[in-house]
Amino acid sequence: MPGQTFKLVVLISGNGSNLQSIIDHIQAGTLDARIMAVISNRADAFGLERARAAGIEALTMDPAEYSSACGFDHDLAKTVSRYQPRLIVLAGYMRILGADFVDRFEGKIVNIHPSLLPKYKGLNTHQRAIDAGDSEHGASVHYVTCELDDGPIIIQQRVEISPQDTAATLQKKVHQAEHRIYPIAIQRIVTGEVNFNRIKTES
Ligand code: GRF
């Protein structure tokens, strides 16, 4: 909507290089959004420092302080809601969000996954692609639904797997692809070019 700030809340667990790419694109004017807060489930996530360096509110919510995953998700939802985001961006958030959380924000959560979904859901995607003898691998941005790494795909980028590639070198290539496509995917949602309900019907 013209004139309205498209608010994001970003959830992270670690390095936050995808967060950095989003911050950079916002600062460069190629992504018309504003990050209201970055929330990490780990206090030592470097992404928190990246957020603070960019003047963004950065907070930690520690699951160990909760007696159940459900209780944690409930508080997370409350905290996220305070910022009234149009979109919740998972950028290396390494906790599975419960069904209540996902239902509450249906169509408003996106994730980036290091594989060409539906291939290689879950972890260790780079090694699995090499072990399978694949010639290509990549990254996917998708809407989050209750099924892990399974929601409608917004954008993907392929990278070539060369015979010399190790999981580490492949991860580097995939990261570069991720940093390119995540801001593009979010911008398409901002402009309305991509919409969860439309994508759901089409797929
Ligand atoms: C990325 O590879 C992303 O696909 C996965 O977690 C990693 C996060 O990296 N979900 P970073 O924290 O953004 O550097």
Image (cartoon, rainbow, N blue to C red):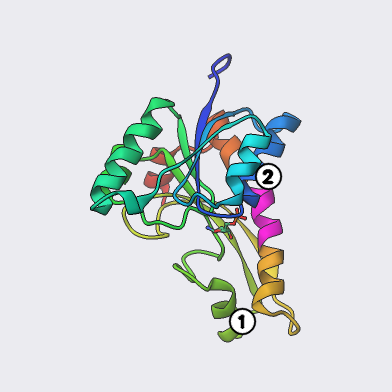
Relative image position of residue 59 (x, y in whole percent): 49, 38
Which quadrant of the figure has residue 166?
bottom right
Which residue is pictured at 66% across the width and 33% down the height? Answer: 31
Nearer the camera: disc 1 or disc 2: 2
Q: Which mark is residue 21?
A: 2
Q: Main secondary structure of the magenta part?
A: helix
Amino acid type at circle 1 is: Ile
Q: Residue furthest top?
A: 3
Relative image position of residue 60 (x, y in whole percent): 46, 43
Relative image position of residue 92 (x, y in whole percent): 53, 54
Picture quarter with ligand 1 = bottom right
Choose between 163 and 71: the one closer to the eye.
Answer: 71
Category of crowding for the residue at label 1, using alpha-carbon neighbours closer than 10 angstroms: few (below 14), some (14–19), many (at least 20):
some
Relative image position of residue 164 (x, y in whole percent): 76, 83
Choose between 85 and 159: the one closer to the eye.
Answer: 85
In this rendering, position of residue 104 left or right of residue 17: left
Which residue is pictured at 37% across the width and 45% down the height? Answer: 201
Disc 1 target residue: 130
Q: Is mark 2 within 8 Å of ligand 1?
A: yes
SS at badge 2: helix
Amino acid type at circle 2 is: Ser
> What range is drawn magenta here?
175-181
